[in-house]
C-alpha cells in the first residue's frame, strides 16, 4: 500500500469514527501518525477537511465531498488487488468482514485462526456493527461480506450456516424461570426489556409473525444492559442463545414452544460480482463445523 492509499484509509476511518485517537487504535497507528496523515491530505487538498474540537472531529463541507470519491478509489484498488491474485488462482489479500457482537465474541477468533491457517496470505479486516450497518457497507463496497441473521427482500446473497435458538431469559427467582418451555403468548403478560431498533430485528420479527404486542418496559442500547436489568428482576427478554454465551449474569433461559430460531449466515454481493477470495471464504464457512443448532 502506497502513502496515498494509507492516507485515504486513515481519512475514511477518522471520518467514520469522528475521533483521531479511536481511528489510530482501530488502524494500529500512532495518534501522531494519524494526525500527520490528515494534515498531509489537507495540504494536498488545499483546504480544511475536519473541524477539530475537544469532543472529536467532524467533516467540513469539503471533507464531505471527498468521502464518496475516496471510498470509491479505495474500493477499486481493493478490487484490483483481489483480481490480480485471482488471475493466478492465488487466495491472498485483505478480506473485509462484517460481524455482529455475539458472533464476533463466540466464533470469529476460531474462524479467523482456522481460515488464515489454511490461507496464510490472507489478512482479515474485521468490522463490528448492526445488521443494517453490515448490509449497507457490503452494498457500498466497504465490506466484502458479513455475518447476519437471515435477510429478506435484499439484493445480497445469503448463505445459511446454522440455526440459533431464541430463548426467554428471566431472573432466577422469576415465575417463568422453572418452566421447561413457554408458549410465545405468555410473554404478553410480563414486562419486556428490549434493545433499540436495529439491534432487535430478530425479536421483533418473531412478535410480528405471531401478531403479539408485548408490554415493553425498557428499550436499552445493548444486550449487556438488557441482561443486567433482567437479572435484577426488572422484566424478561427474548434473546438468541448465542448472545447468552457472552453473559456474566446469573439468568434462567427457557426455550419457546414451538421453538423459534434465527438463521445465522454469511451475506455478500451476488456471486457473479464477488472475488475468488470472497468465494473461497464463503465455501470455507459453509463447510465449517458450526452446530446445526446451539441448544
Image (cartoon, helix red, strand yellow):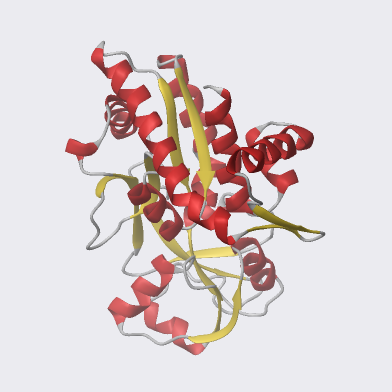
Q: Residue placed at 70% from the left, 31% from the top?
A: 29
Near-viewer residue (272 or 100): 272
Q: Position of residue 41 (x, y in %)?
A: 62, 39
Residue 163 visible in the picture = no
Write down the quadrant of residue 185 in the picture.
bottom left
Q: Residue placed at 55% from the left, 37% from the top?
A: 9
Give the mark count: 0
Q: Residue placed at 41% from the left, 15% from the top?
A: 118
Q: Position of residue 253 (x, y in %)?
A: 53, 63
Residue that sits furthest to the right in the current view: 54
Residue that sits furthest to the top in the current view: 88
Above-or-below relation of 231 to 97: below
Residue that sits furthest to the front in the current view: 46
Q: Position of residue 142 (x, y in %)?
A: 42, 44
Q: Position of residue 13 (x, y in %)?
A: 59, 44
Write down the quadrant of residue 89 in the picture.
top left
Write down the quadrant of residue 291 in the picture.
top left
Residue that sits furthest to the left in the current view: 272
| Left or right of residue 16: residue 139 | left
Above-or-below relation of 151 to 126: below
Q: Residue placed at 46% from the left, 85% from the top?
A: 214
Residue 21 visible in the picture = yes
Amino acid at each position: 500500500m502506497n502513502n496515498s492509499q494509507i492516507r485515504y484509509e486513515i481519512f475514511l476511518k477518522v471520518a467514520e469514527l469522528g475521533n483521531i485517537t479511536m481511528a489510530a487504535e482501530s488502524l494500529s497507528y500512532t495518534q501522531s501518525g494519524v494526525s500527520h496523515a490528515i494534515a498531509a491530505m489537507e495540504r494536498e487538498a488545499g483546504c480544511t477537511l475536519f473541524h477539530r474540537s475537544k469532543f472529536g472531529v467532524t467533516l467540513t463541507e469539503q471533507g464531505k465531498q471527498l468521502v464518496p470519491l475516496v471510498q470509491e478509489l479505495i474500493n477499486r484498488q481493493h478490487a484490483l488487488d483481489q483480481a490480480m491474485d485471482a488471475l493466478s488462482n492465488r487466495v491472498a489479500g485483505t478480506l473485509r468482514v462484517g460481524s455482529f457482537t455475539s458472533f464476533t465474541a463466540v466464533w470469529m477468533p476460531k474462524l479467523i485462526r482456522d481460515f488464515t491457517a489454511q490461507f496464510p496470505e490472507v489478512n482479515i479486516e474485521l468490522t463490528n456493527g448492526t445488521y443494517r450497518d453490515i448490509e449497507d457497507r457490503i452494498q457500498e463496497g466497504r465490506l466484502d461480506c458479513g455475518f447476519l441473521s437471515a435477510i429478506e427482500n435484499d439484493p445480497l446473497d445469503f448463505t445459511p450456516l446454522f440455526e440459533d435458538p431464541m430463548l426467554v431469559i428471566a431472573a432466577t427467582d422469576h415465575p417463568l424461570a422453572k418452566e421447561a418451555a413457554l408458549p410465545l403468548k405468555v410473554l404478553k403478560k410480563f414486562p419486556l426489556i428490549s434493545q433499540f431498533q436495529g439491534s432487535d430485528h430478530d425479536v421483533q420479527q418473531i412478535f410480528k409473525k405471531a401478531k403479539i404486542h408485548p408490554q415493553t418496559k425498557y428499550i436499552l442500547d445493548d444486550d449487556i444492559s438488557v441482561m443486567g436489568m433482567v437479572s435484577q428482576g426488572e422484566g424478561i427478554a427474548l434473546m438468541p442463545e448465542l448472545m447468552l454465551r457472552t453473559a456474566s449474569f446469573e439468568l434462567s433461559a427457557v426455550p419457546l414452544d414451538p421453538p423459534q430460531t434465527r438463521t445465522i449466515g454469511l451475506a455478500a454481493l451476488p456471486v457473479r460480482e464477488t472475488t475468488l477470495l470472497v468465494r473461497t471464504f464463503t465455501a470455507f464457512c459453509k463447510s465449517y463445523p458450526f452446530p446445526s443448532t446451539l441448544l
